[in-house]
Image: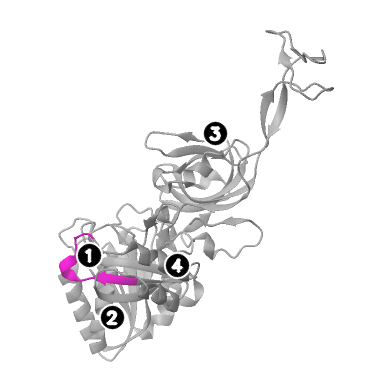
Amino acid sequence: MIIGIDDTDSNEGMCTTYLGALLIEELQAYGTVEDCPLLVRLNPTIPYKTRGNAAIALKLKTDCPERVITHIISRIKELSRMECEKTNPGTVFILEKDYKRFKPVLRDFLEKAVRNVIEIKEAKSLISEYGVFSKGFKNGRGLIGALAACGAMLNLEEWDCTFEYLAYRQKERWGTPREIEMKSFLEADRITYPQTWDTVDLTNRLVVCVPRSADPVLFGIRGENPDIVTEAASLIRAEPIERFAVYRTNQGTDMHLLSAVNLSEIQNMHSYRLKGTVSAVPKTILGGHVIFPIRDQEGNEIDCAAFEPTKNFRLLIRKLRPGDRIVLSGSVSSGTLNIEKIEIKTLSPLYKEENPKCPNCGKHMKSSGQAQGFRCKKCKTQAASKILHQVKRDLTVGLYEVPPCARRHLAKPLVREKRSDVDIHPAR
């Protein structure tokens, strides 16, 4: 059977992946947990999410599915942060006899949950129509993620995947400052990068794989396969851990991005890869955010932003000028695209005015006075006006990304790009 679970955590604590790690151990009493558990990130713009909008799925071989269902529902009741208004758990159970029947419908549901917006009633309607055994708590919003996670497990062969090693804190330490040795994270990154990524942010001197919230996670190492994330984790020196789990994930895959033919298609709470031309000089606004508009061939425009948390990435964005042709990846909220990556396709020429040069000696002429042109004092040559001189741009075409400290879970890091048609500039 496949078990999907979502929305057991809150902003104040708990983590659905921690419940998954507990169940991996506890379900051994009822059968055999097969393959890696799944951690599936859903649409990152959904306002109801707690932190990372993640659901999990487990695959279990068992002769007593009823006992498994009873145990899981009991553990969800016990461990979920039900007192939080935003915590609305859901769990779904797919029996092996139904795998083939549910595979296509839950594949479509997964893709919609990652890229679009799904209402609770749509999930409940699917559950009712197909006779899916499920349990929702409170308003049951977690049923959306639980169904999507089951869809991911049923369709593993169809999607790009990465892995994450998640280490969990001892319960008595939850909510207290995490004790870690930064040098060990730097060493783990040095040895395993680029097979692992987003362990540290070298430019900003930050450990980014350690959360700051009160949840049970001590750290999470992301990488290409279970062996490399386990190797990196073995190099970490930190407080004792209670347990760990290695999850297969859709993190770092760009699974959330839609293609937009023109900017008139853009909707809030969706993520896109879109083309455009810079139509105004970027401006820095209150809070340090950098904003600029792009225009498509039909004249439609949208504001794009490198927000303050993107740190040094904003220096790159400030160098853009009208006429630059670019491709952006990011999510749209309140009518503004939050940039995750930028491909600079072509740079528009940049000119500045300067005094004309003397054709004889090559030196710049001096002004002869207001509206009197220019004159070379040495050669006595004259010119009527200033000339335009093309300036070399302090920017090169290529593919750039926000730093690790600002990367969203689903955004594909450039170290995973396999393209040969563009210069790639990974952020470190």
Q: Amino acid at mark 4?
A: Asp
Query: Which mark's residue is nearer the viewer, 1 or 4?
Result: 1
- Residues at marks 2 and 1, CA–CA distance in whole angstroms: 17 Å
Q: What residue does disc 2 label?
A: 24
Front-lying residue, 406 or 33: 406
Query: Which mark's residue is nearer the viewer, 3 or 2?
Result: 3
User: Mark 3 and mark 4 in contact (Cβ < 8 Å)?
Assistant: no
Front-lying residue, 46 or 170: 170
Residue range of the region highlighted in magenta in the rendering: 166-177
Residue 170 lies in the magenta-colored region? yes
- Residues at marks 1 and 4, CA–CA distance in whole angstroms: 29 Å
In this view, the residue farthest toward the front is 378
Mark earlier in primary sequence (2, 1): 1
Q: Is residue 395 left or right of residue 330?
A: right
Q: Which mark is residue 14?
A: 1
Q: Report if residue 126 is visible in the image.
A: no
In this view, the residue farthest toward the bottom is 63
Q: Amino acid at mark 2?
A: Ile
- Judge the density around disc 2: few (<14), some (14-19), many (≥20) Cα neighbours within 10 Å: many
Q: What residue does disc 4 label?
A: 108
**Residue 339: image location, x then y, percent:** 47, 48
Q: Report if residue 282 is visible in the image.
A: yes
User: Mark 1 and mark 2 in contact (Cβ < 8 Å)?
Assistant: no
Mark earlier in primary sequence (4, 3): 4
Mark earlier in primary sequence (3, 2): 2
- Residues at marks 4 and 3, CA–CA distance in whole angstroms: 41 Å
**Residue 366: image location, x then y, percent:** 71, 15
- Judge the density around disc 1: few (<14), some (14-19), many (≥20) Cα neighbours within 10 Å: many
Q: Compared with residue 260, is residue 126 higher up or lower down, i.e. above or below?
A: below
